[in-house]
Amino acid sequence: MEITIVRVGTGENDLSLKAASALKSAEKIVLHTAHCGCAKWLNENNIPFDTLDDIYDEAYDFDEVADEAVKRLNAYQENVHFCVMELQDETVKRLLDADNKISIIASGADDLLIARAKGAYLTVCAIDIENTAISKEHDTIVKEIDTRELASEVKLKLMHDYPDESDIYVLQRGGVAKCSLTDLDRLSVYDHTVSCLIHANTSLVTGEKHDFYSLMRLTRALRDPDTGCPWDREQTHETLKRDTLEEAYELEDAIENGDENDLIEELGDVLFTAALQIQVAIDHGEFDEIDVITGVVNKMVSRHSHVFGRDEVENIDGLMNLWDKAKRKEKALGGVKDEMNAVAKAFPALLRAQKVLKRAQKAGYQTLDINHLAINEQNIGNALFEIAEWARQRGIDAEKALQDTILKYIDEFNDQ
């Protein structure tokens, strides 16, 4: 017994000449449902058929529908033409998974690949693939691979996102064959009819390459109420503050050390802490990754009006003035005092002090007069070190003392 899958569409006029001819000579016709134009056409031509509508009526869910449909079809003794409205049908996928030799009568050559797609898929012409965002989160169909050179470009692009040894389906001269992605540029023939399909790879365990979607799926899994990690489930924005800060310091060390592998690792750790913070927000209905990314893109576009707008700058000083102007507008900052208060309070006290004083000076306000002092970097380092020891001996929190002084300076600052 052989099964031939026939795409018949939804309306009576969707039936192709090839499909109609095949159905007229079929031994046994089974419609997925009689609620389609093909059923009307079969009745008008006095062609008998069975349907699977009773399975829909009795099954608990769509998985059970597909399981029972496959069993029913395989139970026939005659050769079966199985008619479906669309090839992206769960029963079709299960039939193909069980037997890749099943025949397909489609309205177009690409349908032979579409029938094998699992869920959502992206279709792109090979010539456009370099400028197309590809993700292993979904299937991808690449059309019109008409030269070996173009096949090599497609292969490299897909290998950037999908595992190198992924299986692909290649449509070539009206037939579909399965091969490895690495062999895409080793086919015997290339022309405008050659296309390929590669399946999504969403496994966090077996996937050898991951993207931002993988990272967000990881955080969802770690915070899953039933199967997640107890530590990750308990985290809040507040509890993750220290981890975020520590990872930023470790990233700074990696940059200072100049080690590329360390830099990759520490950038990953910083990105993970950001993703985990986003997942916490998602779980509490606050915001999601799209809100975060949209916010930073819009902010950077606004602050780079010399790139994305009509403003012009001649040097770095002009650029910094433009940047400060954009920041004041975004944050609705009034005078210098507002700008000082906008300096993050989580900064280390010494860094925050320098930023606060710099904002006062940029606005033309006189800060501390130290021109008469003979100070260099080494002397400042020694003095800070001695002050830290002096504070330690007397039980004074030097960090808090400087933060208090900064607050006092800002409070007493007069914008007028």
Image (cartoon, rainbow, N blue to C red):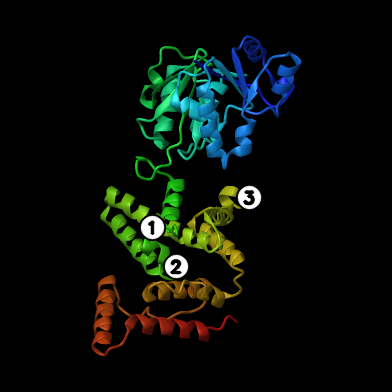
Q: Which residue is mark 3?
A: 310
Instruction: Using the numbered discs, state the Cα–Cα distance from disc 3 to disc 1 in whole angstroms.
Output: 34 Å
Q: Residue at x 65, y 19 (%)?
A: 49
Residue drawn at x 44%, y 12% is 189
User: In the displayed structure, would residue 293 be above or below residue 176?
Assistant: below
Residue underneath mark 2:
236
Category of crowding for the residue at label 2, using alpha-carbon neighbours closer than 10 angstroms: few (below 14), some (14–19), many (at least 20): some
Q: Secondary structure at mark 1?
A: helix
Tell me the amino acid under the disc marked 2. Answer: Thr
Q: Is residue 252 left or right of residue 94?
A: left
386 relative to 135 in the view: left or right = left
Q: Which is more foreground, mark 3 or mark 1?
A: 1
Q: Position of residue 329 (x, y in %)?
A: 61, 65
At label 1, the amino acid type is Val
Q: Nearer the viewer, residue 306 or 184?
A: 184
Q: Give 337 or 271, whichever is nearer the viewer.
A: 271
Which percent across, then down, holds residue 186?
38, 17
Q: First in sequence: mark 1 or mark 2?
A: 2
Q: CA distance from mark 3 to mark 2?
A: 42 Å
Badge nearest the viewer, 3 or 2: 2
Q: Earlier in the sequence, mark 3 or mark 1?
A: 1
x and y percentages locating residue 6 in the rendered image: 60, 20
* Residue annotated with mark 1: 270
Q: Secondary structure at mark 3?
A: loop
Q: Residue at x 53, y 32 (%)?
A: 68
Tell me the crowding category of disc 1: few under 14, some 14 to 19, or many 20 or more residues within 10 angstroms, Cα based: many
| Foreground of the two, 101 or 345 | 101
Q: Could you tell me if the residues under marks 3 and 2 are in contact, i.e. CB atoms within 8 Å? A: no
